[in-house]
Structure formats: C-alpha cells, structure tokens
Amino acid sequence: MTKIAKGKVLEVWQERVKSGETLFRQGALERARVEFEAAICLQETTELVYTLGEVCLAMHDVESATHYFRRYLVLSAKKVQSEKSAA
C-alpha cells in the first residue's frame, strides 16, 4: 500500500471514529455501532474495541458486548506482552 493510500485509510478511519463518538453522545447507538464497526475493519485498536463493547452494552446487546470486551482483553494482553518483550 502506498503512503497516499495509507494516509487515506487513516483519514477515513478517523472520520468514522469521530462520527461514531458524536452519534454515541447523541444516543444514536445503532448508527454509532455501524461507524465503529466500519472503523475496526480499517484498523483495530484496543480503545475502539472497548468502545464498541460499551455501545453494545448501552444497546442491551450483552452477547456482543461480551464479545468486544473479551476481544479487548486479548488485544490488551498481547500489547502488554509485546511491550515486555521490547523492554
């Protein structure tokens, strides 16, 4: 992927996250979820996975919330392990 393409992906990712955050604050939970899920398809981060868990929990979708919170724990453990290895 070229630098331009990577830059465009990051730009779209940032737009999706920002839109999701705004929609979440407005209480438009289903639309926020769509935006966050689209952002995760572009780049998965621990913070974004956790946020999706919060959105699902607010929607009373406990099964999906549990999935995202478990994914958050897995990603966080990998991140800590990676940081320990680098030290």
Image: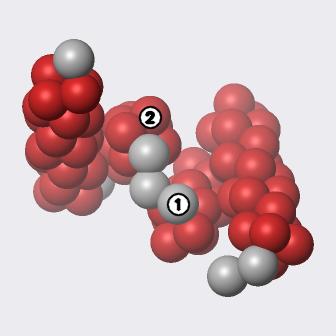
Residue behind mark 1: 43
Q: At x 50% / y 72%, what residue is drawn?
A: 41
Residues marked 1 and 2 touching at CB (< 8 Å) = no
Q: Residue 23 appears at what percent x and percent y?
A: 73, 45
Binning the other alpha carbons within 10 Å of mark 1 as few (below 14), some (14 to 19) or many (20 upward) gives: few
- Can residue 82 be seen? yes
- Can residue 59 be seen? no
Q: At x 44% / y 34%, what residue is drawn?
A: 47
Q: Determine the secondary structure under disc 2.
A: helix
Residue behind mark 2: 47
Q: Where 7 falls versus 61 (above or below)?
A: below
Foreground pick, 3 / 30: 3
Q: CA distance from mark 1 to mark 2?
A: 11 Å
Which mark is nearer the camera, 1 or 2?
Answer: 1
Say which quadrant the C terminus sits in.
Answer: top left
Which residue type carries mark 1?
Gln
Q: Which mark is residue 17?
A: none
Identity of the residue furthest to the top in this view: 87
Binning the other alpha carbons within 10 Å of mark 2 as few (below 14), some (14 to 19) or many (20 upward) gives: few
Which residue type carries mark 2?
Glu
Foreground pick, 53 / 15: 15
Q: Report the side of 43 relative to 45 (left or right).
A: right
Foreground pick, 79 / 38: 79
Q: Where 38 falls versus 58 (above or below)?
A: below
Identity of the residue furthest to the bottom in this view: 1
Q: Report the side of 19 relative to 65 (left or right).
A: right
Q: Residue 20 appears at what percent x and percent y?
A: 68, 48
Say which quadrant the N terminus sits in.
Answer: bottom right
